[in-house]
Amino acid sequence: IVTAMATDGQNLMDPLAIIAASAALHVSDIPWNGPIAATTIGFVDGEFVVNPTAAQMEHSSLSLVAAGTEDNILMVEAGAHEMPEDLVLEALKLAHENNQIVIKAIHELRAALGKPKAPASIFLPSPEVETEVATLAVDKIAATLEQGLSKVELNNAL
């Protein structure tokens, strides 16, 4: 959980929270497969805006946040008003490129301040537990998924 202690009211907090959590994990001794970064892309007056302010977002026909690693985009949250697919793809590429700048900085932070990672202990359930869970849940989950429910209905049913 990331809690902002102050904000200027103009810069969007979601990408900053993702970056802060990623940097904290990366310099800590907690084992994980990071770092990640996030970038917001807006589209104002026919131009992409990287990490737009709240005021710019009021006039943006695109609101896209993409989080990812050095290699891949992991998460996309987007809303758009009549945005062609090729422009959305261009926005995703732009976000991924900008994420690389932040990821490089997080790596540099780890090199300067990072702790050695603790050994990871992986817990895997026994075959008996896997069989029991499959027996109890797989058919019910499959039947629920096949009902064609809305997102809210599916969430409630599961």
Image (cartoon, rainbow, N blue to C red):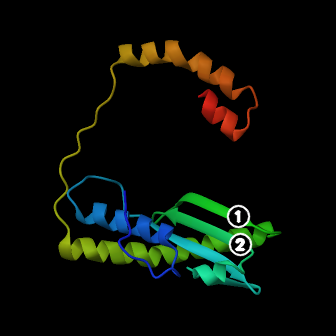
Q: Quadrant of residue 18?
A: bottom left
Label 1: few (<14), some (14–19) or many (≥20) C-alpha neighbours in 10 Å:
few
Label 2: few (<14), some (14–19) or many (≥20) C-alpha neighbours in 10 Å:
many
Left or right, residue 60 beside residue 37 = right
Q: Amino acid at mark 2?
A: Leu
Name the foreground residue: 46 vs 104. 46
| Residue 142 in picture, x, y percent from top left | 64, 23
Q: Residue at x 35, y 78 (%)?
A: 105
Q: Amino acid at mark 1?
A: Gly
Quarter of the figure with the N terminus: bottom left
Q: In the displayed structure, would residue 74 be above or below residue 62?
A: above
For label 2, the SS is strand
Question: Which of marks 1 and 2 precedes in the sequence?
Answer: 2
Residue 47, label in figure = none
Quarter of the figure with the C terminus: top right
Left or right, residue 88 beside residue 39 = right
Name the foreground residue: 130 vs 43. 43
Rounded to the nearest angstrom, the CA distance separating label 2 from label 1 is 6 Å
| Residue 151 in picture, x, y percent from top left | 68, 40
| Residue 122 in picture, x, y percent from top left | 28, 37
For label 1, the SS is strand
The answer to whether mark 2 and mark 1 are in CB contact below 8 A is yes
Residue 62, label in figure = 2
Q: Residue at x 49, y 63 (%)?
A: 68
Residue under circle 1?
Answer: 79
Name the foreground residue: 128 vs 1. 1
Report the label total: 2
Q: Residue at x 63, y 27 (%)?
A: 157
Q: Residue at x 65, y 83 (%)?
A: 56
